[in-house]
Image (tube, grey):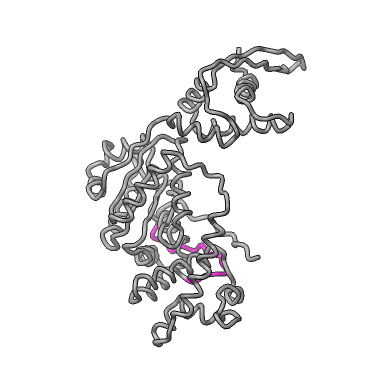
Amino acid sequence: MVTPSTIQDAPTAASDRPVMVHHNLLFNIPGDKVKLACQDLPAQQAHIIWWFYQWCRKHDFSRSALGTVLKKIGGGFYSPDSIVQLLTGGRARRGENIEPLLDAIETLRKIEEERSGQAHSGFIETRLAKEIAKRCKKALLRQRIMFIFGDSQIGKSAALKQFQKDNNHGQTVYVETPTGGGVGSFVFALAKQFSIPTKMGCRASLRERVVESFDSRMLLIVDEAHRCLHPRNTAGLEVFSFLRELWNRRQCGIVLAFTNEGRDAFLHGPHAATLAQLWRRRITPLQLPNVPPDDDAALFASAYGLPQATDEPVTVRVTLTDERGKSQTKQHSDSPLRLQREVLKTEGLGVWIGILQDASDMAAEQERKITWAAVIKAYSQSLAESQVLD
């Protein structure tokens, strides 16, 4: 099996000096070259080739391994050279018939999508996740900019990553804004998505190739966009200028995800006037609630084998051992619904899922079925170990 090679981390600061980081990939055909090869093809043919390109890139196939992926109707496989020529446009430029190769790709695609449908990713499709996916589709179809706002630990990133996974036919590009928010590291992160070599003479050349890799049938998801906003540092504003340029030139859909603090800084901070140009290109933004609704929380509970949380109190006993080795047992009562709401409100979804997992592990160790008593005990034990429980 071919495994992806490691990629060196991107620089974190914006700079016009040459970028000297290498992509140590076996499959290293740049995405902008494939886009150029597809630009004069019918939309359906271009879509098939772009899906195949992304599939090859995901699996990081070596040149020889390419000769084992597309089957001919009469038996055998298409050669690596035939595939490379298809991806880079050589066959189309020579007027050769590419339909048999496209048919082979479609056969492969059906198999891969069936396998993907059978695989369980562990992702739980909540009401909020469905709404995020709906807004992503709207941004794609309308070729506009969508803003999504919501507190940390509400499930934004998980939903956005799942949308990219579900629509990963070269159509959706997901990138997390690098720490520091500089345009240099941001463009570098996008270049990695298209396998564009980053050992280039200047940042402007890399930036141009990244822009040319997008088209109007694509969606760019930018997560953690608030990292570009710094009250006393304007370097991050270049990222938003780049995004405005990308939308103006390529008319692709763009989704920008911010925390609520990032929302306030974007709309009312010291750079609001500058950012207004991007804001005016939006469709109706999505504001997520601060706490997941009870029906979404019930889906997470169900995933761990629990019934829906109720207001009925549950009492558990928690045994503590102090630094002197002395044990003490305390009693703690709580209702599952109150605890669920409280943890989700004050600590977030990630912490709550961690508590559910601890309870699941506790039940498995005792060879018992998980119950809400186990959840309350896991939470109480955590508090006790932190010396919070009186």
Residue 16 part of the magenta-drawn span: yes
Q: Quadrant location of residue 14?
A: bottom left
Instruction: Find the magenta span and give its range.
Output: 15-29
Quarter holding residue 1: bottom right
Q: Where is 319 relative to 43, above or below?
A: above
Q: Please state the horizontal and vertical placement of residue 342, each as a whole percent of the image.
A: 48, 22
Observer-nearest of 117 and 10: 117
Main SS, magenta residues: loop
Residue 386 visible somewhere in the drawing: no
Confirm whether residue 368 shows in the render: yes
Q: Is residue 176 above or below residue 303?
A: below
Residue beneath the point at 28% across and 60% down: 251
Q: Residue 156: x percent and y percent? A: 43, 41
Q: Is residue 263 above or below residue 116?
A: above
Residue at 32% from the left image edge and 40% from the top image edge: 286
Q: Determine the residue positioned at 76% across, 14% down.
A: 326
